Amino acid sequence: MMIAPFLAGVSITPVAGATAAPSGTALYAKALSDAAASSGVHITGTITSSSFVQHGVEDTDQRGGTVLETIAAGSAQFAFSERLIGSKLYLNGDQDSLETQLQLDQVTAGFDAGYWRVVPTTSKYYEELSYGLNLATSIDLIALAPPFTVAGPLRHDNTEAYAISSATGLHAGSGLGPGRGAFTLWVSTGRDPLPIAEVGHDVVDNTAQVIWTYFSHWGERFVVGAPKIVKPV
């Protein structure tokens, strides 16, 4: 099984004198267990395909998180921010994102653009919008499945890491389920391995896409406060 190729410019080199790689199943389980026990993580990710490019920056912990997403699809470009505090979800977006994310009519989206608004838990969009905005669900998105192959240890930029590869992964959200492709999760070496990066190549709705995700600042707690001005729904 191949290691899914990573971004150009990322240096990947063998580690001299390294011992044999551990079991992929055990290493994968330990890395996700350590990630779930962490207090927080900073995540940056990019999805590219022939029809769109999506970029996100997220800070998340056990209680919730914040994310800023930008999407370019053809000539359309839109952006939105979200905050999740417990079960309370706030969304702030431009007109295009409100029409797309909440299916608001053009007039309402125009008036609400740029204002924070609460997304009720009863909304049919709540689960999709809130998924991945706390530590537990952000880790759920790392959903590789055996059989695994492990390469390394290798030096991923300046970090010694193992590369865990699988032909099954999940990248498109909570609703689509696992998909076939080429997926590689990079985890740090040592007693407490943690995810460093992930890259996936898969096909969604007959469109090939590439997903890059970087994890950093494991163990940090992020202060997520409610917006000061929230427009009524």
Image (spheres, rainbow, N blue to C red):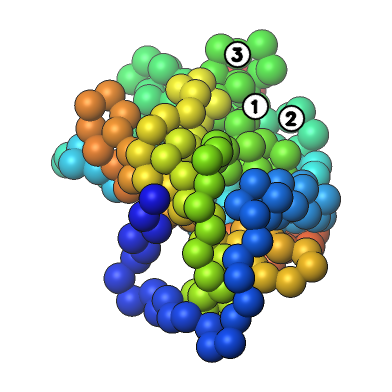
Q: Is residue 173 above or below residue 225?
A: above
Indicate the amino acid at tag 3: Ser
Mark 3 crowdedness (10 Å alpha carbons): few <14, some 14-19, many ≥20: few
Identify the image quadrant of residue 99.
top left
**In what element is the residue under mark 2?**
strand
Q: Residue furthest bottom?
A: 16
Q: Quadrant of residue 91?
A: top right
Q: Nearer the viewer, mark 2 or mark 1?
A: 2
Residue 169 % position (x, y): 48, 37
On the picture, is 123 further left or further right than 228? Answer: left
Residue at the (67%, 31%) spot, across then down = 89
Amino acid type assigned to the residue bearing label 1 in the image: Val
Circle 1 residues within 10 Å: few <14, some 14–19, many ≥20: some
Q: Amino acid at mark 2?
A: Lys
Q: How many marks?
A: 3
Determine the secondary structure under disc 1.
strand
- For image coordinates 61% across by 22% down, the residue present is 127
- Disc 2 residue crowd, few under 14, some 14–19, many 20+, Cα 10 Å: some
The span from disc 3 to disc 1 (Cα, nearest Å) is 10 Å
Instruction: From the viewer's perspective, tell me whether residue 215 is left or right of residue 191.
Output: left
Residue 62 seen by the camera: yes
Q: Which mark is residue 118?
A: 1
Q: Earlier in the sequence, mark 3 or mark 1?
A: 1
What number is the disc on residue 88? 2
Is 24 or 52 nearer to us in this picture?
24
- Which quarter of the rendered picture does the C terminus lie within? top right
C-alpha separation, residue under disc 2 versus residue under disc 1: 7 Å
Earlier residue among tags 3 and 2: 2
